Image: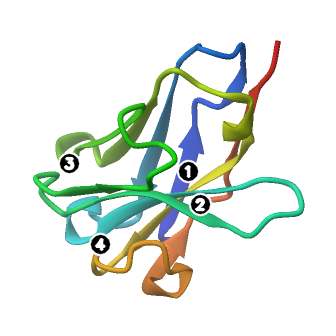
Amino acid sequence: QLQLVESGGGLVQPGGSLRLSCAASGFTLDTYVIGWFRQAPGKEREGVSCTSRSGGSTNYADSVKGRFTISRDNAKNTVYLQMNSLKPEDTAIYYCAAGGYCSGYKTTARYSYWGQGTQVTVSS
């Protein structure tokens, strides 16, 4: 069974850091690009970042550029999202998704598989 599982979310103070993980089972992650999305209450799901199959090419939303870093370890079948300098507006459920292309990475329909999400709350 193909599955993506996110982990690493939690409660953090403004200015803090978290590292999210997206682990795949049932398939080889390096055959897909991986995107990270987030969805805050009452808002649409927002594309945050995307990494190519090799990890050599990445994309970031303007709202997280310079603060978040996406990386992947294909040997561990895992993709990471390092989040630094967190702000209250980063509070959301974060999802990873597997797809074919990072171009147009913010479009949810481009992804075939989704995880269940992990909650990130930034609050003092």
Which x, y percent locates residue 113?
Answer: 50, 74
Q: How many marks?
A: 4
Image location of residue 63, percent across then percent down: 51, 47
Marks 3 and 4, how far apart in space? Answer: 17 Å
Residue at x-position 82% and y-position 12%: 124
Q: Quadrant of residue 49?
A: bottom left
Secondary structure of the residue carrying tag 3 is: helix
Sequence order check: which comes first, mark 1 or mark 3?
Answer: 1
Q: Is residue 68 above or below residue 37?
A: above
Of label 1 and label 2, which has the lower sequence position?
Answer: 1
Q: Which residue is mark 1?
A: 5
Q: CA distance from mark 1 to mark 4?
A: 20 Å
Q: Residue at x 50, y 80 (%)?
A: 107
Amino acid type indicated by mark 1: Val
Which kind of residue does numbered mark 4 sit on? Answer: Cys
- Alpha carbon separation for disc pair 1 and 2: 5 Å
Going by the image, does 89 lie left or right of 55?
right
Q: Which residue is mark 4?
A: 102
Question: Mark number for residue 15?
Answer: none
Q: Nearer the viewer, mark 3 or mark 4?
A: 4
Location of mark 3 (residue): 74
Task: Give the residue number, with chain letter if any, for mark 2.
Answer: 115
The answer to which of marks 4 and 2 sits earlier in the sequence is 4
Residue 20 percent coordinates (x, y): 50, 35
> Which x, y percent locates residue 3?
52, 63
Give the residue type that dot 2 points to. Answer: Gly
Q: Nearer the viewer, mark 4 or mark 2?
A: 4
Q: Residue at x 55, y 50 (%)?
A: 5
Secondary element under disc 1, as helix, strand or loop, is strand
Q: CA distance from mark 3 to mark 2?
A: 17 Å
